[in-house]
Image (tube, rainbow, N blue to C red):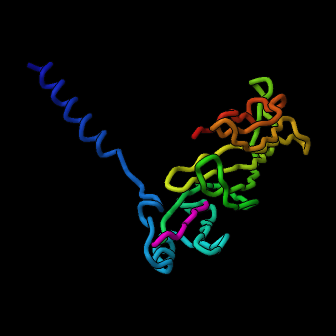
Amino acid sequence: MKRMIVIALLLASVSPASSRRVVHIPTIGELCPGSAEWDKVATCIRRQSPFKLARDEVGVKLVQIAEGSRFAGLYIYTLDKQWKLQGEMRLYQAHDLLQFERVTMGKRTGFRLDVGTAMPSAISVDGETSMPAVFRYKLTSLCFVNSYCMQMNTACDVLVRGKAMYSFRGEVVHEGGKIKVVGDRSNTGAYCQQPELVGSD
């Protein structure tokens, strides 16, 4: 009898507690998916966080929310009868927008985003001691129309005392129905790795 009471108490304590721990935090895409009028979209985003328009072109707006916000990153809105969130690149560290352009790869069209980031960190070469380092990345995101965004590392430097200990330079190519990041991987180490194959048609 005592054993049955203990089991019942354990089941009662585990089940409700575990379900209460699941908390869903809404995204910009869920809160501000779009509208027929840009002013309404902008008002919705502003309710969540201050932002600026990093690019404002005909039928395209690139929203930039600075680090420090839980919505930090870049958001592409396009106009086709109404404004719609086309893609996003979440970035919680300081970053610089390096490039934003339309791209066509195979039968798919979309946008390419390139941003640069740098952050202090530390690395260990022998697995025991660590040394200060600076990680510098060029991150590229391909956001295709009515699809999803693919993010990749197209450049990387791990700087120790101002010199690159590890590095990588890659180029995004589309060939044979596949999207790849090609480049010399001989000095990537454990910190600058990027798979060659990114996606396919």
Q: Is 142 on the left-hand or right-hand side of 171?
A: left
Locate residue 163: give its quadrant: top right
Residue 53 or residue 85, whichever sits in front: 85
| Count of labels in the image | 0
Q: Which residues are magenta?
A: 74-81
Q: Is 201 on the left-hand or right-hand side of 122?
A: left
**Residue 13, image x, y percentages:** 23, 35
Asked if residue 11 is positioned above or below residue 163 in the image, the reply reads above
Residue 27 or residue 40, whichever sits in front: 40
Question: Which residue: 63% across, 65% down?
Answer: 66
**Residue 16, image x, y percentages:** 24, 41
Question: Which residue: 65% across, 53% down?
Answer: 104
Asked if residue 181 is positioned above or below residue 72 in the image, the reply reads above
**Residue 63, image x, y percentages:** 60, 68
Quadrant where the C terminus sits is top right
Name of the residue lying farthest toward the left: 1
Asked if residue 5 is positioned above or below residue 159 in the image, the reply reads above
Question: Which residue: 67% across, 55% down?
Answer: 103
User: Magenta stretch: residue 121 in it?
Assistant: no
**Residue 127, image x, y percentages:** 74, 24
Residue 157 or residue 149, whichever sits in front: 149
Quadrant where the N terminus sits is top left
Name the chief secondary structure element in magenta. strand
Question: Which residue: 76% across, 39% down?
Answer: 122
Locate residue 76: give its quadrant: bottom right
